[in-house]
Image: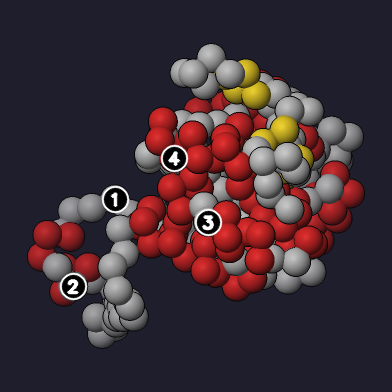
């Protein structure tokens, strides 16, 4: 239970807040910490919407899961979201709490049912949707998670490597497809597709490869930050117009 004398277990990197209190691996988080964050860091949504009564009403196993979700917001007081979903069902299981954070982050009021229609008849012409879209550069990003894996923050090294192994096969079909081609590159040490640091830096500079997650203090400590580059990779077609990646993190805090 999250009480004054029964702290939440914490994980992750050292992060000293403006109040001079250093938070590091092995420290513990008490309810007073979250209450203080609510006052000193009002933009930290994890702290702003944390409800002690809601937490204490959860069964112990769900309390432990929620602790992992909010750990990053405590360790990094200047976080905006301050929370990291670890499993796909976290959004349903902790909806009463996470829904408030998501709505606040995206400035959502009331119920929303977004409807979009990009059918302009025949060849897509953005000008038929809005004349202001006559000369634009567009990037479409789609992220998906496999149902039999946890989200990146909770994945073990073995799970990340298993995910990459499955995606290598999928991307192999893309590489072999006429009109796509290209190649697959990996950041996993020892992978047959592993690339050099120089090649990695070059791809990052081209905005074709994601940055090293282990250097991002806002990433969730239990999973992705500890596995570093393991299981991270991308594939790009010959024409260089798009790219696909595996092992990418979820939204950081």
Earlier sequence position, callout 2 versus callout 4: 4
State the scheme by which the image is colored: secondary structure
The residue at the point 30 percent across, 74 percent down is 110
Sequence-first tag of 2 and 1: 2
Relative to 205, is 174 on the left or the right? right
Q: Secondary structure at mark 4?
A: helix
Label 4, residues with CA under 10 Å away: few <14, some 14-19, many ≥20:
some
Residue drawn at (23%, 71%) of the image: 125
Q: CA distance from mark 4 to mark 3?
A: 11 Å
Residue 199 percent location from the top left of the image: 65, 27
Label 1 sits on residue: 137
Estimate the x, y position of residue 188 in percent, counting from the top left: 80, 38
The residue at which mark 3 appears reads as: 51
Tag in front: 3 or 1: 3
According to the image, label 2 marks what residue?
Answer: 129
Task: Say whether marks 2 and 1 touch (CB < 8 Å).
Answer: no
| Badge number at residue 38 | 4
Q: Which mark is residue 149?
A: none
> Left of 151 or right of it: where is 51?
left
């Amino acid at each position: 239970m999250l009480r004054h004398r029964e702290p939440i277990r914490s994980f992750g990197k050292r992060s000293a807040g403006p109040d001079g209190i250093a938070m590091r691996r092995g420290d513990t988080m008490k309810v007073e910490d979250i209450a203080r964050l609510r006052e000193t860091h009002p933009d930290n949504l994890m702290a702003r919407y944390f409800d002690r009564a809601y937490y204490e009403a959860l069964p112990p196993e769900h309390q432990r899961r929620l602790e992992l979700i909010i750990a990053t917001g405590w360790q990094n007081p200047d976080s905006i979201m301050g929370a990291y979903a670890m499993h796909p069902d976290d959004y349903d299981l902790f909806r009463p709490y996470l829904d408030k954070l998501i709505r606040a982050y995206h400035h959502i009021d009331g119920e929303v049912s977004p409807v979009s229609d990009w059918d302009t008849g025949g060849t897509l012409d953005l000008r038929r949707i809005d004349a202001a879209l006559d000369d634009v550069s567009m990037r479409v990003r789609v992220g998906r998670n496999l149902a039999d894996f946890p989200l990146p923050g909770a994945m073990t090294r073995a799970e990340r490597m298993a995910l990459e192994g499955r995606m290598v096969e999928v991307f192999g079909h893309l590489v072999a497809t006429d009109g796509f081609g290209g190649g697959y590159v990996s950041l996993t040490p020892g992978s047959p597709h592993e690339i050099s640091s120089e090649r990695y830096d070059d791809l990052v500079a081209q905005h074709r490869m994601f940055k090293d997650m282990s250097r991002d203090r806002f990433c969730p400590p239990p999973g992705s930050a500890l596995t570093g580059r393991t299981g991270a990779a991308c594939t790009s077609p010959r024409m260089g117009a798009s790219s696909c990646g595996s092992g990418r993190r979820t939204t950081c805090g």
